[in-house]
Image: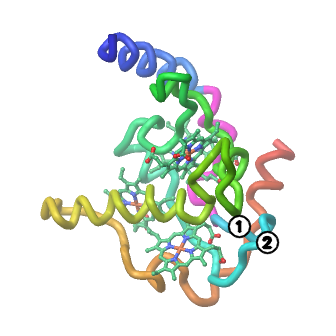
Amino acid sequence: MKYMTTLLAAALTLALAAPLALGQEDVMTLSSAEQGLKDRPPVVFSHAKHSDIYDCTACHHEYDKFMANQGGGEAKCSECHQPSATAKNPTPLTLAFHQQCKSCHLKLIQMKAPQTGPIMCGDCHRAGVPAAPQAKEAKKK
Ligand code: HEC
Ligand code: HEC
Ligand code: HEC
Ligand code: HEC
């Protein structure tokens, strides 16, 4: 059953990848300033580089009631993850980002993978990165 779900998700991913690819930036500037969180500089994230390596569902999820990732759900993380934990969604926004980004990079380091990403604060939150409103630009398209 789990195998079927995976196959289905993969098929969906293929079907959705082409049209969605048009609506997303290659390099994104991630910021939670709109959610009132702005202690650190925004994070520059190479979406294209990451999605060349990984399936969309490695990061994007929409869970059914059995907590199986149905794929889709390529919304902003803040659509579901709130600044503080809620009963409906216990993972706050900043933790959601950190848990996803850092734990993958860390796992790769532990596995001695040839390529990984940063795990230090200042290597993701680089001083001097201006907030780019790419979210607004995406909506205009
Ligand atoms: C792998 C990349 C990565 C690393 C390493 C990382 N962060 Fe983040 N962090 C993010 C992303 C992505 C966001 C969400 C976008 C944003 O708001 O900057 C975020 C959000 C935040 C936020 C909420 C937004 C804000 O500016 O208030 C804080 C605070 C924060 N990080 C602090 C830290 C601290 C402290 C460390 C080191 C202990 C750290 N981060 C390490 C990627 C990272
Ligand atoms: C390594 C993680 C990762 C992978 C793999 C990935 N994405 Fe993303 N994607 C993100 C993050 C993080 C964002 C920014 C979300 C935010 O701003 O809250 C994003 C944003 C997007 C957005 C824009 C959302 C918006 O409304 O601004 C789209 C569309 C999208 N991704 C589609 C895809 C598709 C299609 C794939 C597979 C081909 C994919 N992504 C693979 C992490 C990933
Ligand atoms: C459609 C709603 C929705 C969107 C959009 C969404 N999430 Fe989630 N996420 C959930 C739900 C529901 C859970 C499970 C409950 C929980 O642990 O908060 C979850 C769990 C998580 C978890 C903890 C468990 C796990 O799967 O590792 C992380 C980390 C996470 N999300 C990161 C993200 C990131 C990063 C984004 C944006 C790229 C994102 N989420 C977008 C709904 C969503
Ligand atoms: C599933 C694993 C995975 C996840 C999740 C992931 N990364 Fe990465 N990241 C990688 C790998 C692998 C590389 C090395 C890619 C390369 O060098 O070609 C990388 C490289 C990077 C780099 C340095 C190279 C570059 O792109 O310029 C940054 C910055 C980065 N990641 C940020 C993030 C942020 C921010 C998130 C969360 C929104 C994130 N990553 C989520 C696996 C991951």
| Relative depth, front residue between 110 and 127 | 110
| Relative depth, front residue between 77 and 81 | 81
Q: Quadrant of the N terminus?
A: top left
Q: Quadrant of the C terminus?
A: top right
Q: Position of residue 118 (x, y in %)?
A: 37, 73
Q: Is residue 114 above or below residue 25?
A: below
Residue position marked by numbered label 2 in the rendering: 36
Q: Is mark 2 within 8 Å of ligand 1?
A: no
| Relative depth, front residue between 110 and 11 | 110
Q: Position of residue 113 (x, y in %)?
A: 17, 60
Distance between mark 1 and mark 2 Cα atoms = 7 Å
Q: Which mark is residue 73?
A: none
Q: Is mark 1 within 8 Å of ligand 1?
A: yes
Element at label 1: loop
10 Å crowding of disc 2: few (<14), some (14-19), many (20+): few
Image position of 32 (left or right of 6):
right
* Residue at x 64% of width, y 75% of height: 42
Q: How is the image coloured?
A: rainbow
Span shown in magenta:
19-29
